[in-house]
Image: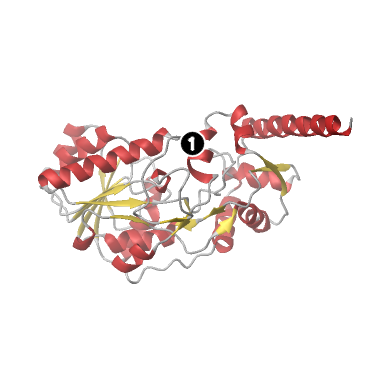
Amino acid sequence: MKILFIGGTGLISAASSKLAIEKGYELYLLNRGNRSSFAPEGARVILGDINNVQEVENAIKDLTFDVVVNWIAFTPKEIERDIKLFSGKTKQYIFISSASAYQKPVSHYLIDESTPLANPHWEYSRNKIACEERLMLEYRNNGFPFTIVRPSLTYGDPLIPASVTSWNNPWSLVDRMRKGKKIIVQGDGTSLWSMTHNTDFAKGLVGLLGNSQSIAHSFHITTDEVLSWNQIYQTIGAAGGTTPNIIHIPTEFIMLFDAGEEGNLLGDKAPSAVFDNSKIKKYVPDFVATTTFAVGVKQTINWFEAKPERCEVDEGWNDLCDRIISAYEVGIAAAKKGESK
């Protein structure tokens, strides 16, 4: 089977690239070559920018594919481009959407693929929804053979996954824990979440490659393990050899200091998200997530510590945390003082 990954060397996609090669697939990676160290041996790299349509057309003019997977499409305009590029050149086009597209707040605690798509808090998610709608329209009108995959928070070696964290320098969270500084957890920390290791996600994704029954269907690929955010932060601390000093702060208060957190928190990680993954198991019978969060995050921390240069600390994020905590504690103290009068 001949597969084209657009991207293929990112956090989620690199594990799928590796597994596709192990399965014996003929894998092509179309990217700019900026992360060539994450390309698995045996993959054929096509250097190019997917946004340069003429460049890509020239690069693939003599190629057709059984499957094309776009890991880096985010807007309907990019979907329009891909429809023009790959109509007639692939038997299946897989769009990597996002589980953040599901209804916020959810009307039922258990999320499956029939859960409505609506997210007023995050433009990223609304764009993903619009991409899905455009693909469905193209399928109805012209038979474009799409499959939609919605990852939730998927992590691997370069990412220590959390909710309130530095995404640019993930090690900052462990460093802060080890120094005994207070760690912000949104709300009361009891909302539920699923952390999926990228090697587990890859099993589901690769199982969908060339699966004709998955055309015009959507799937989320998630672990069966469900943890509260308190448990998640405690597990990260244990993996780092420490106990986090957690302080619970309301999501809306956090957003007063960083309005950009509305999408990340209200639009994604603050509400409980428990995923029914029976559909991917039905279509990919051998799919099973086997990496617990405790094991996976320990592997990630070991990856960071293997090379000290990876352990960069985001002092700007540290300062932001300190300001939020200080303001919150001042407010709490003032409220308690007022009550005592």
Residue 186 drawn at (x, y percent):
62, 43
SS assignment at label 1: helix
Q: In which quarter of the image is the N terminus?
A: bottom left
Q: Mark 1 points at which residue?
A: 263
Front residue of this view, candidates 67 and 131: 131
219 sits left or right of 56 in the view: right
Residue 247 drawn at (x, y percent):
71, 43
Which amino acid type corresponds to the residue marked 1 in the rendered image? Gly
147 sits left or right of 163 in the view: left
Q: Quadrant of the C terminus?
A: top right
Instruction: Please identify the quarter of the rendering in which residue 51 is found.
Output: top left
The answer to whether residue 62 is visible is no
Residue at the limit of the structure toward the bottom, as seen here: 286
180 versus 303 height, above or below: above
Total count of labels = 1
Residue at left offset 61%, top offset 28%: 256
331 versus 298 height, above or below: above
Residue 129 drawn at (x, y percent):
33, 40
Instruction: Please identify the quarter of the rendering in which residue 79 is found.
Output: top left
Residue at left offset 46%, top offset 53%: 108
Residue 258 drawn at (x, y percent):
58, 29
Residue at left offset 25%, top offset 32%: 77
Front residue of this view, candidates 35 and 189: 189
Residue at left offset 55%, top offset 60%: 293
Q: Residues within 10 Å of mark 1 (few under 14, many from 20)?
A: many
The answer to whether residue 255 is visible is yes
How was this image coloured?
A: secondary structure
Front residue of this view, candidates 282 and 52: 282
48 versus 66 height, above or below: above
